[in-house]
Image (cartoon, helix red, strand yellow):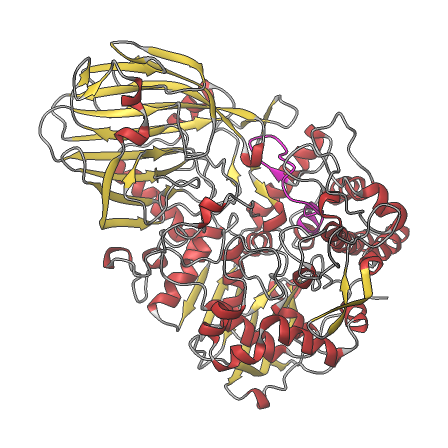
Amino acid sequence: MRRKVLASALTLAAAATVVSPTVAAAAGGDALDAVNTFIGTQDEGNTFPGASAPFGMTQVSPITSHYAGYRYTDTAIRGFGHFFLSGAGCWEQGGLVSTLPTTGEVGPGKAFDTRAAVTFDQKQYASPFTHDGEVGKPGYYKVRLTGYGGVDVETTAATRAGAERYTFTKPGDANVFVNVGQANDKEPVTGSSIRVVDDRTVEGTVESQAFCGGKAYTTYFTTKFDKPFKAFGTWSPTGGTPGSRSSEGGAGLRGAWLTFGGGGQVTATTAISQVDAQGARVNLASEHIRSFDSAKADAQRSWRRELSSVDIKGGTPDDRTVFYTSLYHALLQPLTANDADGRYYGFDKKIHRAVGWTYYDFFSLWDTYRTQNQLLALLRPGRARDIAKSILAIHDQGGWLPRWAYASQETNTMTGDPVTPFLVDLWRFGALSGNELRAYDALLQNSREIPPASSPFQGRSGNASYQQDGFVQYDPDFPKKGQDTDPNHGASATLEYALGDCSLSVMAAALGKKDDAAALAAKGRTYRTLWDSTQADRGFTGFFRPKVHGGAWFSPADKPYSPQSQDGFHEGTAWQYQWLVQQDVPGLVQRMGGPAATGKRLDDFFAYDELVKDPAKAVRENWVVGPYDYYDQFRYNPNNEPDLHSPWMYALTGQPAKTSTVVRSAHTLFTNAPNGVTGNDDLGTMSAWYVFSALGLYPAVPGTGNFVLNTPRFAKSVVHLENGKDIRIQAPGADGAKLQYVSGLKVGSKASDRVYVGFDQLKRGATLDFTLTTDAAKATWATSPSSAPPSPCAG
């Protein structure tokens, strides 16, 4: 998801394109050593470099001046927060419970003058830092603060707690500021409290605004230090009070300072909870953090286990770093949301308990349904089952399925119907075993109905028009309950509904619900109602066009309608959304004028002839390369979700070699540098796209379980499945620096001319042997009409 932010956010300094040797990738060996957590921390990738456990509740990462937390080119660190999202697009992204080590006396007229409230503004007391010696690895972060006489800060994290170790260079007393009244830039804190419990412990709360303008929610925390503090005090919007044990109130500066005698080294451990103060205490105790070094070792052991699910051979050191960093980013979320005692705060505002499973929250479904969901289902089916169970728990407690769930509330962010392909793919991958009918009933309700006005869920708000007339009307003024609503983007919502209904038809058929399956499959073809065969642009005729209530084509008041306009489409144009019909490729090809005309349109969309000449140059000169440049575009946007699958439309229409050209070209946008992610990473969506495309298989058609193939980037990749089976992908001579094409494929010992493999094949263990060529003329593999998978809703 990408929120269109103010222009000031687009005037950032250019990212550094060279990473210091301390964070550069190793040439091989340990996958953990290959990861560079600074990738995506510049140019709106919105990742964070700090420490997290896989799918962790608590993250410990630096806060600079950026709304996502850390921006590589910033020069001062305001604190180290304990909650972050990875790659999200809206402003409200955490940085809660910000701590910073300082030196200097605190008191009236002292270095930190308690008489002035501004003294305790983190923008004022922030410390400069250096990238020299800065380390960003899974489960571990280190940085040198150059202020306050020099302080080395290290962070690590367990699932429900984080730890920081501060090493002070300057002799004498030292402080730790615990700021609860401020968080990431543009994250409103509407209330907070802090209490000094004893000479090693502080506890409190932060009430902050949920993502994309959501409602306020409360985070509880407890922080313990490994040594007693000799003095303390708290601050409030009126200033600081030495010796005060508590501060509580609404919005405004608030926190506590803790002074340690003799400085030296201080370690703090922090746990959070969305349930209550006891939950934070239980979480901290459950992690059994004996020391910083033991916590770091445990975190990195967990990450080695996660990252070792895929072994790659071949490629450059940078290739290895980009791959494993992408895999790392894809395994950060959704976030663990139940406390160690199983309790979690539900969507009915009541406390529930997960017994024997993990409840997850923070679901960016409009993004993750396309790539990250399938990657988790393939690599971590146990977690995928709990994710599916969590989504169904949200439905049971809230009455409806979510779209963008954040902190036990529906933010109603983004449009369309992402939860349907999300859950249907989890069903296809086996994650709904035993819950198929329960999930199907919830999905059918979501497909056909609209939540009542009293519900905080918006659901398919365009269903009245869609069910009656086959399209969601375009109405920019349609009322909404949150950030977005479907009729505000009626054309793209129609396409998303159709894709979702088609995927649900596949599930219905498998469950023996024949009438439902037929009706849903017909709904999967409702995209046709918006095909305007008279619209022409760039020499091509026929485009999707929004309709208004009653069925008339939308036309702007002051100019002719253009397929390059934003009218009716969410974060894209008709050019990008024209390919969101992978459920009915024959129907789309027919409307575009046949295979040859469709191929020419794809060539123009990707600037194909330019890609062949110089891929790296062509993508930056022809494609959409700004993270928020959604609109007035007619080319491929690799920074955003609506057309992520479009490179594989070549393969689905008989030209798989061109898919490989586009994918290899797109890979040049993923680099071992802070700006090495295209656009927002969107909770691992873009990273999962890279992982799949580098392996050479992509889940292009929701609900089918099919992976469409392209040239692998590595000579050998082995995916280790949880069931003990392996997927071996072999492509001798693979070289990511060249354009290469598939000239032959063996699946097991048998030659295959299919451009796809099914999940049912892969889950039993499989070997894919690719033969590659650099001569496109010899790449005739999988070009016959029978090579492509059948479209599930063609008809």
Toward the viewer: 377 or 749?
377
Q: Is residue 565 left or right of residue 373?
A: right
Above or below: residue 734 compared with residue 4:
below
Towards the viewer: 312 or 372: 372
Which is nearer the eye, 82 or 131? 131
Give whichever of 468, 519 is nearer the camera: 468
Residue at image point 48% right, 49% down: 331
Give the position of the C terminus as an image quadrant: bottom right
Q: Is residue 287 above or below residue 74?
A: above
Residue 143 lies, in percent from the top left, at 25, 43
Counting the numbered discs, the total is 0
Q: Is residue 728 left or right of residue 59?
A: right
Q: Residue visible at 42% across and 50% down?
A: 11
The relative height of residue 668 versus residue 360 in the rendered view (above or below) is below
Q: Describe residue 68's horizontal placement relative to residue 370 as left or right.
A: left
Q: Position of residue 454 (x, y in %)?
A: 75, 25
Quadrant of residue 749 in the image?
bottom right
Residue 313 part of the magenta-drawn span: no
- Name the chief secondary structure element in magenta: loop
* Above or below, 197 relative to 727: above
Position of residue 782 in the picture relative to residue 155 (left or right)? right
* Residue 768 appears in view: no
What is the magenta range? 404-424
Quadrant in the rendering for residue 465: top right
Picture coordinates of residue 292, whole percent (x, y) = 26, 36
Percent of width and height locating residue 432: 68, 46
Q: Would residue 293 be visible to someone looking at this image?
A: yes
Is residue 410 located in the magenta-colored stretch of the structure?
Answer: yes
Residue lying farthest to the left in this orientation: 171
